[in-house]
Amino acid sequence: MFEIAKLISGTEISKVIKNEIKQEVEEVVRLKGVRPGLTVILVGDDPASKVYVRNKQLGYEEVGFKSEAIKMNAGVSTEDILWEIDRLNNDVSIHGILVQLPIPGQVDKIKYWKQ
């Protein structure tokens, strides 16, 4: 009639998934000589964003990714952010770019997102 609930542990599931990813990363490095690289662009001084970005970096490093964070001041222009993204797009060691939200109000989001 009713099924008994099964308790699952997000922490344990996370460990299993991270271990699988780590093994896959090691295999890519072994076979292709390439370590996946991720960069996070953090604009401004939002405390929650700083914590979130730091946790992302720790997670990336835990599974064997190359990780870096680029911190830009809150007064940055749309063009400065786009220039940084373009630079990273042309860096063969970077395979993913995350721009941490929120970004300041002076950034032209329409121009930014169309790039």
Image (spheres, rainbow, N blue to C red):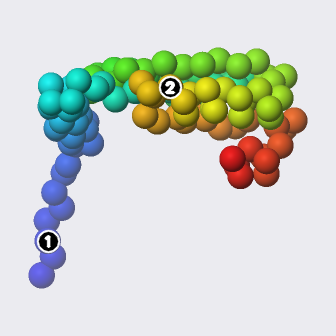
* Residue type of the residue flagged with mark 1: Glu
- Between circles 1 and 2, the one closer to the viewer is 2
Examine the rendering and report whether any part of residue 48 can be seen: no
Q: CA distance from mark 1 to mark 2?
A: 53 Å
Q: Quadrant of residue 17?
A: top left
| Label 2 Cα crowd, 10 Å radius (few <14 / some 14-19 / many 20+) | few
Q: Nearer the viewer, residue 68 or 30?
A: 30
Examine the rendering and report whether any part of residue 34 can be seen: yes
Q: Nearer the viewer, residue 87 or 4?
A: 87
**x and y percentages locating residue 78 in the rendered image:** 80, 34
Q: Quadrant of residue 62?
A: top left
Q: Residue furthest right?
A: 106
Name which residue lies at 71% across and 52% down: 114
Label disc, if present, on residue 91 of the rendered structure: 2
Query: Is residue 112 shown above or below 35?
Result: below
If you read the primary sequence from the N terminus, does the residue marked by circle 1 or circle 2 appear first? 1
**x and y percentages locating residue 84 in the rendered image:** 66, 26
Name which residue lies at 80% across and 32% down: 79
Q: Residue furthest bottom?
A: 1
Quadrant holding the N terminus = bottom left
Query: Is residue 8 shown above or below 54?
Result: below
Q: Which residue is mark 1?
A: 3
Q: Give left or right: position of 7 versus 36.
A: left
**x and y percentages locating residue 113 in the rendered image:** 70, 49
| Label 1 Cα crowd, 10 Å radius (few <14 / some 14-19 / many 20+) | few
* Residue type of the residue flagged with mark 2: Asp
Q: Quadrant of residue 103?
A: top right
Query: Is residue 105 shown above or below 110?
Result: above
- Mark 1 residue element: loop
Name which residue lies at 71% across and 19% down: 72
Name which residue lies at 69% across and 47% down: 115
